[in-house]
Image: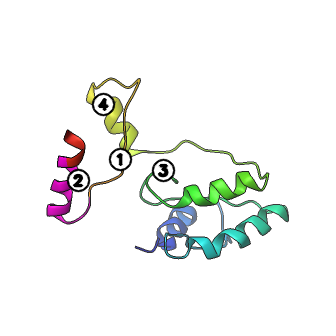
Amino acid sequence: MPADTRKTGLLLEKLGVVKKARLISYYEQNGLQRISPFIEDLKGGKNVALVSSAGTPTISDPGYKLVRECLSQGTKVKAIPGPSALLASLVCSGLPTDKFLFLGYLPKKRVNGSRFLEIFAQ
């Protein structure tokens, strides 16, 4: 599903952080076409921020492809820690945190989610 840049825009406006930021959606269906322009902007000295309105960028989202390409092009990547439902849940669960496996989110259809859990429960 396409990312909604309006959420990020509203947040930036409310915080007064950036008034004229150019927001560009980046999602699975358009990601490959967007990578080159982002790399060009970075090489031209512009700052680019990868923002996710549904969690931490690159965790179960296609942003990792942009990061991977930036690194392969020699572009420096910095992370700013933010909220992560996955990690917050793990930390508050009482489960051991020295090792864990994240397989992504369950499929939306209940039957597919049940099958997914059956496969990995073994």
For marks 2 and 3, give the CA distance: 23 Å
Q: Which residues are magenta?
A: 107-118
> Viewed as shown, does residue 38 lie left or right of 25?
right
For marks 4 and 1, give the CA distance: 19 Å
Marks 3 and 1 in Cβ contact (< 8 Å): no
Marks 2 and 3 in Cβ contact (< 8 Å): no
Q: Which residue is mark 2?
A: 116
For marks 1 and 2, give the CA distance: 10 Å
Looking at the image, tell me whether mark 3 or mark 4 is earlier in sequence order. 3
* SS at mark 1 in the image: loop
Quarter holding residue 99? top left
From the viewer's side, name the closer residue of 80 and 76: 76
Q: Which residue is mark 3?
A: 56
Looking at the image, tell me whether mark 4 or mark 1 is earlier in sequence order. 4
Q: Residue at x 71, y 56 (%)?
A: 70
Q: Residue at x 72, y 73 (%)?
A: 37
Q: Which mark is residue 103?
A: 1
For marks 4 and 2, give the CA distance: 24 Å
Q: Residue at x 64, y 54 (%)?
A: 68
Q: Which residue is mark 4?
A: 92
Looking at the image, tell me whether mark 2 or mark 3 is earlier in sequence order. 3
* SS at mark 2 in the image: helix
**Circle 1: is it few (<14), some (14-19), or many (20+) Cα within 10 Å?**
few
Is 17 rendered above or below residue 89?
A: below
**Circle 2: is it few (<14), some (14-19), or many (20+) Cα within 10 Å?**
some
Mark 2 is on which residue type? Phe
Residue mark closest to the camera, 2 vs 3:
2
Mark 3 is on which residue type? Thr
Q: Does residue 109 belong to the magenta stretch?
A: yes
Residue situated furthest right in the rendering = 44
